[in-house]
């Protein structure tokens, strides 16, 4: 997000797509919000097998247990990144002056 400081908000739009929300802050600033991250990930499943092989003559058999763990899916809605901007008459655009980090650890 630091790379956009002092840049036109349209640079963020080029890299991230259109904002999900934009609103005036009442003090000449405008906030633009973008969705970042999110999605669904399939988690691997692990099976651990242990046991004993018994052999008698030409015959062998296995006696053991299998423990399976993990698997399933993890879903995150993502995080909202907010860029605060001010209108620059000379540049004819909203210029990023600060940003707000998401309050969640996982996006």
Image: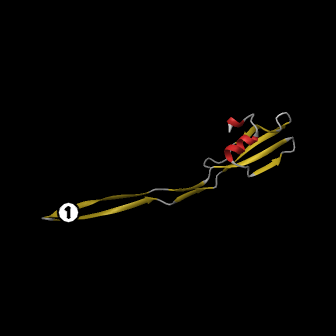
Q: Say if 92 sits above or below 65 in the image.
A: above
Q: Position of residue 68 (x, y in %)?
A: 40, 61
Q: Residue at x 69, y 48 (%)?
A: 17
The colour scheme used to paint the residues is secondary structure
Q: Residue at x 32, y 63 (%)?
A: 65
Q: Residue at x 64, y 55 (%)?
A: 77
Q: Residue furthest left?
A: 57
Q: Is 45 on the left or on the right of 26, as rendered?
A: left
Q: Is 67 on the left or on the right of 74, as rendered?
A: left
Give whichever of 22, 11 is nearer the camera: 11
Q: In which quadrant will I find the N terminus?
A: top right
Dot 1 lies on which element? strand
Q: Position of residue 97 (x, y in %)?
A: 77, 36
Q: Position of residue 50 (x, y in %)?
A: 31, 58
Query: Can you identify the residue that label 1 sits on?
Result: 54
**Number of disc labels:** 1
Give whichever of 8, 26 is nearer the camera: 8
Q: Is 48 on the left or on the right of 54, as rendered?
A: right
Q: Position of residue 62 (x, y in %)?
A: 25, 64
Q: Say if 71 sits above or below 19 in the image.
A: below
Q: Is 63 on the left or on the right of 29, as rendered?
A: left
Q: Residues within 10 Å of mark 1 (few under 14, many from 20)?
A: few
Give whichever of 1, 61 is nearer the camera: 1
């Amino acid at each position: 997000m630091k790379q956009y400081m002092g840049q036109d908000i349209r640079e963020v739009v080029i890299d991230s797509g259109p904002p999900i929300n934009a609103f005036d802050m009442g003090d000449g600033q405008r906030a633009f919000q973008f969705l970042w991250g999110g999605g669904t990930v399939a988690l691997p499943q692990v099976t651990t097998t242990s046991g004993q092989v018994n052999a008698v003559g030409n015959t062998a058999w296995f006696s053991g247990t299998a423990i399976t763990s993990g698997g399933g899916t993890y879903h995150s809605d993502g995080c909202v990144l907010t860029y605060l901007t001010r209108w620059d008459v000379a540049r004819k655009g909203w210029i990023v002056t600060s940003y707000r980090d998401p309050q969640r650890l996982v996006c």
